[in-house]
Amino acid sequence: MYNLSFEYPYVFLILIIFFLCFKYCKAKESTIFMPHLFLLQKSTQKSSSFVEVLKYLAVILAVTALASPIKIKNTQYINSDGIDIVLSLDTSDSMQQKGFNKFNINENRFDVVKQLVGEFITKRVNDNIALVVFGNSSLVASTLSFDKQAQKEILNYLDIGIVGPRTALFDSLVSSVKILKNSTAKSKVIIVLTDGEDTSSKIPYQITLKLLKKYNIKVYTIGIHSQNEYILNEIANQTNGKYFNANSKEDLVQIYSQIDSLEKSKVKQNKVVLKEYYYFYPLFLSTILLILLIYFKNKE
C-alpha cells in the first residue's frame, strides 16, 4: 500500500513567517498626494490580484518541494548481522524432465524449483538475496537485494535453456563468489541446485573451491536425482555446508525448509524504507509560476 507523506513536514512552518511578513513587513516609500488615485488603483486591481495569487502559489509550492513529498512503497526490518544468500539454479535441458511432482506428472523439474524457491525467498524477510542461473555459462539474474517481490518476478521470467542446454556448475559458483566477495554480512551462503554433472565450466573445480574458502562462503548443494553426488558432497563438506539429494518435490520442500532452519537471522534491528520522491513536481510548478510572476510584475 502506498502512503503519501512529507519527509520534512516542519518546513511548512516557513509559511507562517512568510504570511506574517507579507502582512506586516511593508516597504517604506515616499508618497505623493493624488486626489484621483482610487481610479488608478481600480484599473490595476485585477492585474495586482492575479500577481498576488501567483506570488502566494509560487511560495507555497516551493515550500512544498522543500518539505519533500514522498510515497512509502514498502517498509522492511532487517538485522545488522544478516545473511547474504545467492540462489544458484540449474536451467540446463535436463531440467525439462517431468514426473518430479507426483501430484502433477506434467510439471517439469524447473517449474517445481521456481515455485519452491519463490516460497523460500518470501520466508527470508531479513536477508539480502541474489539469483544466479547456469547452463552453458552462468548468468546473474539478480544482484543482492532486499526487494523480495522484484526477485520473485525475475524468477518467474527465468526458463529452461536461458543460458544454454549444458551445465556450468563451477562457473555458477564463481559468479556467486563475485557477488558475495565484497559482502560485509556476518554469514555468506550459496544454495546451488543441479540435476547433472558439470559439462561446460571454464573454471576448474580446484580454483572454484579455493575462491569459496578464501571468502569464507558456505555452500549448500542440492542434487536432483543426482549423478554428481561425490562432487556436490565434497563442495558442501569443504565449505562447512551440507549436501542434499532430492528425488521428489516432497524431498525438495523438506530440503529448503531444513536450510531455512539452519540459516536463521537474528532479531530484527534496522528498518529499510523504500521511498518514491515527488519534490520535483511542486518545484517545477513553482519555477514556472515565478517566471510568470516576474513577467507580469515587470508589465505593471
Image (spheres, rainbow, N blue to C red):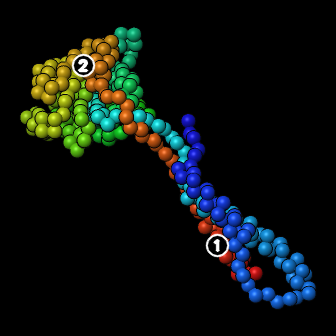
Residue farthest along the left direction in this orientation: 206
219 or 56, which lies in front?
56
Q: Which residue is mark 2?
A: 224
Q: Position of residue 135 (x, y in %)?
A: 25, 33
Dot 2, crowdedness within 10 Å: few (<14), some or many (≥20)? many
Camera-side mark, 1 or 2: 1
Q: Residue at x 20, y 42 (%)?
A: 181
| 9 relative to 220 in the view: left or right | right
15 or 95, which lies in front?
15
Q: Is residue 116 visible?
A: yes
Q: Is residue 231 visible?
A: no
Q: Position of residue 38 (x, y in %)?
A: 89, 80
| 245 relative to 292 in the view: left or right | left
Q: Residue at x 61, y 57 (%)?
A: 13
Q: CA distance from mark 1 to mark 2?
A: 68 Å
Q: Residue at x 19, y 30 (%)?
A: 218
Residue type marked 1: Ile
Q: Position of residue 225 (x, y in %)?
A: 22, 16
Position of the N terminus by quadrant: top right
Above or below, comparing residue 30 to residue 162 in the picture:
below
Q: Give the mark nearest the N terminus, 1 or 2.
A: 2
Q: Which residue is mark 1?
A: 291
**Which of the 4 quarters of the picture holds residue 54?**
bottom right
